[in-house]
């Protein structure tokens, strides 16, 4: 049963397309990492799921219902993002109490324990918190609400390394104890790589790749060697990235549809074959050009 | 399929209403301040009449809490505009909401604010009286308001509440329009002030004065209530319909 289902989702803002025929389907009880560059349409997509935005065209279903202006969807989705406005007149403790009134699955005790662990004081106001502390508090809201679909958009903004790893650990532990569907968006794949099950790659408002993270590790392969040898071996293949630091030497990332035998032959031909880390691969895939920033410097 | 939490619309409206009473507490603090200022203004008197002849010099000052009611009406309008702004509207979306529950809970909140504002405004008459008899050493003559029965007092409170709520509804619609398009923030004042000027130039109160007469010079409380309630329904329906498709945009 898929929790999120969308087809041909398009959203324009004053002529600019934030989402361009975006399609995907997210299964129940999975943690999906939503990865993309700045301005790729991540937040727009998540806001449509949360019922904040209405799509310009296309179809979107959350729990098989249209999310916009939908009370059932609102009761079962919590959208945590770094621009979250919390009521300024309420103290942190009052905010937790209010959340408990609204969300049926809210775990008071769990929230309280996290609250104390991160040394918040009940009488503090959200506006007075530092950026990292705000994110930490928002995270407590996201975890303790235990909504069927929980969306974290850039949840770790401003958090220090220790809190960040605490957050991911807490998320994982709570997910195992209370399985639910979680979407996590981030710029930093290496951070969430060990946490997520599926990866949804988004580029210029379109879905690029939606596969299990384990498959992503095998998805591409790096060839390095003499330029003419590498070119010969990668001819007709889907080249994802290429770079030449030393003259007559080339590094190319290609989609891994080689057989074992072929790879052996390539090695014999003098090509060194390497794995491509998931995070590098994502950078290459979402890049606008094949050579990355180097293209700016290579005038010809 | 996992079980989804089912919530009912009235339940969520109630929950949001309870939340707003707590979260919008500043609104009531500003009410206290505005009414204190208005009471001080009232001490200046609302009217004065003087006559003299020979050895007698007579000066008659009128005092009333009308200024307090007027200020409270203004407060109601501003409060209503305030809660349509993004800072307030977007807060709702952290919690369980849709635009309908959000609007209904806002309406209930404004009604509560109007009741509190109306009751305190009318009761401030007593404060004005006490302060005048304490501060002004001259002869104090009771006006008709002192002789008013409790039913008159109650109908005074009722009418004040309706006036305040009417302006809340107007403010809510104005605020919603401005949220819909910034242009309204310029257009609406121009229309209003332009209307006043137009009335002045033509020498007959057609638009603004006509509205004033429609609401403020109605002698029958029953007829007045019907007029106000119908207008309220129109204003709120307008705001509800306009905001029902509004997206949640941050900053």
Image: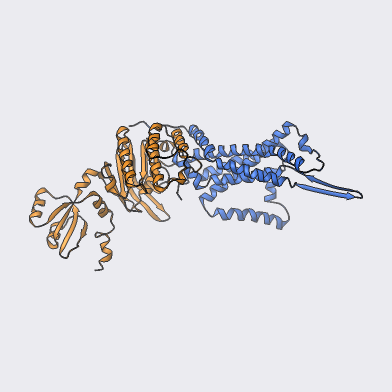
Query: Please, which colouring scheme is shown?
Result: by chain
Q: Nearer the viewer, residue B47 or B136?
A: B136
Q: Quadrant of residue A168?
A: top left
Question: Which residue appears at 62% of the width and 54% of the height?
Answer: B191
Q: How many marks?
A: 0
Point out the image quarter for the N terminus of chain B. top left
> Relative to B18, is B60 above or below?
below
On the question of residue B102 being in view, the answer is: yes
Chain colored orange = A
Q: Quadrant of residue B219?
A: top right
Residue at the farthest bottom position:
A300
Q: Is residue B245 left or right of residue A183?
A: right
Residue at the farthest right position:
B54
Q: Nearer the viewer, residue B132 or B65?
A: B132
Instruction: Report x, y in % for residue A208.
Output: 28, 50
Q: Is residue B55 left or right of residue A123?
A: right
On the question of residue B214 being in view, the answer is: no
Question: Which residue appears at 39% of the width and 47% of the height?
Answer: A132
Picture colour for chain B: blue
> Relative to A262, is A95 above or below?
above
Instruction: Report x, y in % for residue A270.
Output: 9, 57
Instruction: Report x, y in % for residue A279.
Output: 25, 50
Instruction: Report x, y in % for residue A175.
Output: 31, 36
């Amino acid at each position: 049963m898929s929790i999120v289902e969308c087809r041909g989702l398009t959203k324009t803002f004053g002529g600019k397309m934030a989402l361009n025929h975006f399609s995907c389907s997210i299964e129940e009880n999975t943690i999906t990492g939503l990865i993309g560059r700045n301005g790729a349409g991540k937040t727009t997509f998540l806001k449509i799921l949360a019922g904040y935005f209405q799509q310009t065209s296309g179809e979107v279903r959350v729990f098989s219902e249209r999310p916009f202006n939908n009370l059932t969807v609102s009761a079962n989705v919590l959208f945590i993002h770094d621009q979250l406005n919390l009521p300024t007149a309420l103290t942190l403790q009052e905010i937790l109490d209010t959340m408990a009134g609204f969300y049926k699955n809210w775990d008071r005790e769990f929230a309280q324990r996290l609250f104390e662990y991160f040394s918040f004081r009940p009488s503090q106001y959200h506006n007075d918190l530092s950026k990292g502390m705000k994110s930490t508090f928002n995270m407590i809201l996201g975890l303790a609400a235990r909504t069927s679909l929980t969306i974290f958009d850039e949840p770790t903004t401003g958090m220090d390394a220790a809190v960040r790893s605490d957050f991911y650990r807490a998320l994982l532990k709570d997910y195992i104890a209370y399985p639910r569907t979680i979407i996590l968006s981030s710029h930093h794949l290496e951070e969430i790589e060990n946490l997520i099950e599926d990866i949804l790659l988004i580029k210029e408002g379109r879905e690029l790749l939606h596969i299990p993270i384990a498959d992503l590790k095998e998805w591409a392969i790096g060839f390095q060697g003499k330029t003419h040898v590498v070119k010969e071996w990668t001819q007709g293949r889907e080249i994802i990235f290429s770079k030449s630091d030393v003259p007559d030497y080339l590094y190319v990332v290609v989609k891994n549809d080689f057989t074992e035998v072929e790879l052996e032959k390539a090695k014999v031909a003098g090509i060194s074959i390497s794995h491509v880390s998931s995070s590098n691969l994502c950078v290459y895939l979402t890049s606008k050009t094949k050579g990355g920033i180097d293209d700016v410097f290579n005038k010809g | 399929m996992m079980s989804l939490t089912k919530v009912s619309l009235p339940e969520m409206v109630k929950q949001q209403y309870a939340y707003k009473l707590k979260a919008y507490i500043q609104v009531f603090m500003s009410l206290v301040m505005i009414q204190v200022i208005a009471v001080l203004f009232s001490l200046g008197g609302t009217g004065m009449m003087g006559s003299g002849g020979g050895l007698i010099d007579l000066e008659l000052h009128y005092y009333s809490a009308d200024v307090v009611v007027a200020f409270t009406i203004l407060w109601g309008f501003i409060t209503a505009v305030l809660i349509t702004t993004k800072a307030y509207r977007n807060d709702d979306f952290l919690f369980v909401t849709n635009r309908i529950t959000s609007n209904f809970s806002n309406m209930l909140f404004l009604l509560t604010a109007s009741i509190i504002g109306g009751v305190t405004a009318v009761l401030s008459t007593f404060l004005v009286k006490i302060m005048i008899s304490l501060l002004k050493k001259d002869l104090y003559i009771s006006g008709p308001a002192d002789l008013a029965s409790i039913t008159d007092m109650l109908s005074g409170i009722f009418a004040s509440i309706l006036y305040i709520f009417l302006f809340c509804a107007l403010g809510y619609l104005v605020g919603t329009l401005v949220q819909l398009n910034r242009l309204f923030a310029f257009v609406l004042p121009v229309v209003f002030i332009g209307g006043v000027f137009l009335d002045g130039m033509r020498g007959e109160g057609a638009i603004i004065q006509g509205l004033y007469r429609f609401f403020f010079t109605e002698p029958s409380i029953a007829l007045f209530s019907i007029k106000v309630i119908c207008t309220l329904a129109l204003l709120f329906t307008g705001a509800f319909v306009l905001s029902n498709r509004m997206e949640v945009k941050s900053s």
